[in-house]
Amino acid sequence: MKTFNLSPLKKLEIILDGEHQEFATDLLDRAGVKGYTIINNISGKGSHGFHEGHLMFNEDDVLIMIIAAVPEKLVQPILEGFAPFYDEHSGVVFISDIQVTRSVKFGS
């Protein structure tokens, strides 16, 4: 049985309106994030009430979540990039400690 070496990273779960997806992915790309996963049509309740996770008119009218695993050194620059955005728009970034195999895939 093969054993895996685990490497510590930070997981970012970025929730925002779908209309701002390009802003968020551009920010992640410029920060040097190697990849991310985008989940469309999420539901949830926050300070702005309940948000349905189905398409209303188009994909810009739904919440999305972008998940990225990044080295710790990228967390602060990414949060600084999102700070002015979240002053104007709703959403949140969750940050958690994770461990991954194949750390080369994440730029660590």
Image (tube, rainbow, N blue to C red):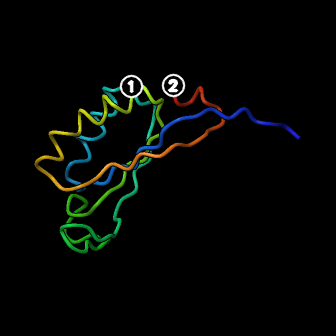
Residue 22, numbered circle: none
Horizontal and vertical percent for residue 33? 41, 30
Q: Which residue is mark 2?
A: 107
- Position of 73 compared to 45: left or right? right
Q: CA distance from mark 2 to mark 1?
A: 8 Å
Q: Are marks 2 and 1 in contact (CB under 8 Å)?
A: yes
Q: Which residue is mark 1?
A: 32
Tell how many labels: 2
Q: Residue at x 58, y 34 (%)?
A: 8
Sequence-wise, the earlier of marks 2 and 1 is 1
For residue 36, above or below residue 39: above
Given the image, on which type of amino acid does mark 1 rest? Gly
Q: Which quadrant is home to the C terminus?
A: top right
- Position of 76 compared to 69: left or right? left
Label 1: state its secondary structure. loop
Most foreground residue, 11 or 28: 11
Label 2: state its secondary structure. loop
For residue 33, above or below residue 40: above
User: Residue 80 appears in which quarter of the rendering?
Assistant: top left
For residue 42, above or below residue 81: below
The single residue placed furthest to the right in the displayed view is: 1
Horizontal and vertical percent for residue 67? 43, 47
Q: Residue at x 20, y 39 (%)?
A: 83
Q: How crowded is the residue under tag 1: few (<14 C-alpha within 10 Å), some, or many (20+)?
A: some
- Position of 61 compared to 96: left or right? left
Most foreground residue, 46 or 31: 46
